[in-house]
Image (cartoon, helix red, strand yellow):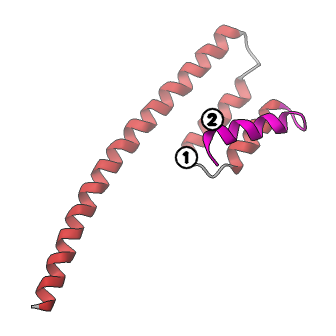
Amino acid sequence: MKYGELFRKTGEQIGVEFAGEAWENCVDKSNISLTNEDKEALKSLGKLLGKTDMQGQLKQLSLVNCFLDEQIKEATIEKEKNSTLYKKLGVIVGLAVVIVLV
């Protein structure tokens, strides 16, 4: 499921259930690449939207946005660390194969 699909399915479910419940269920059922922390942040956003005034909602959106930005930074660092590890592991395995064949 792509991100746009998440919003589309939520929109379809709003007629069947309350908006917050529809959002929560669709986030839970989504198979997009989100960690449990990411999903919890998005679900908490769904619980809070519509329950405060516009300023409160904007503040909540800003907080979730900052949290997700941090998650992206951490994921990027983790990706770089793992890619370096796998490159080195590939070289070591390649050398081991050459040694065994020689």
- Determine the secondary structure under disc 1: loop
Location of residue 10 with respect to 81 vertically, above or below: above
Magenta residues?
1-18
Residue at mark 1: 34
Does residue 49 show up magenta in the picture?
A: no
Q: Is residue 24 left or right of residue 14?
A: left
Location of residue 18 with respect to 83 vertically, above or below: above
- Determine the secondary structure under disc 2: helix
Location of residue 50 with respect to 54 vertically, above or below: below
Quadrant showing the C terminus: bottom left
Q: Are marks 2 and 1 in contact (CB under 8 Å)?
A: yes
Local packing at callout 1 (Cα closer than 10 Å; few below 14, some 14-19, many 20+) is few
Residue at x-position 65% and y-position 38%: 4
Residue at x-position 61% and y-position 45%: 2
Kind of residue sitting beneath label 2: Leu
Q: Is residue 17 left or right of residue 67?
A: right
CA gap between label 2 and label 1 equals 10 Å
Residue at x-position 71% and y-position 24%: 48
Residue at mark 2: 42
Pick whichever, 96 or 47, lies toward us. Answer: 96
Residue 62, position as x, y percentages in the image: 54, 19
Q: Residue furthest left?
A: 102
Kind of residue sitting beneath label 1: Leu
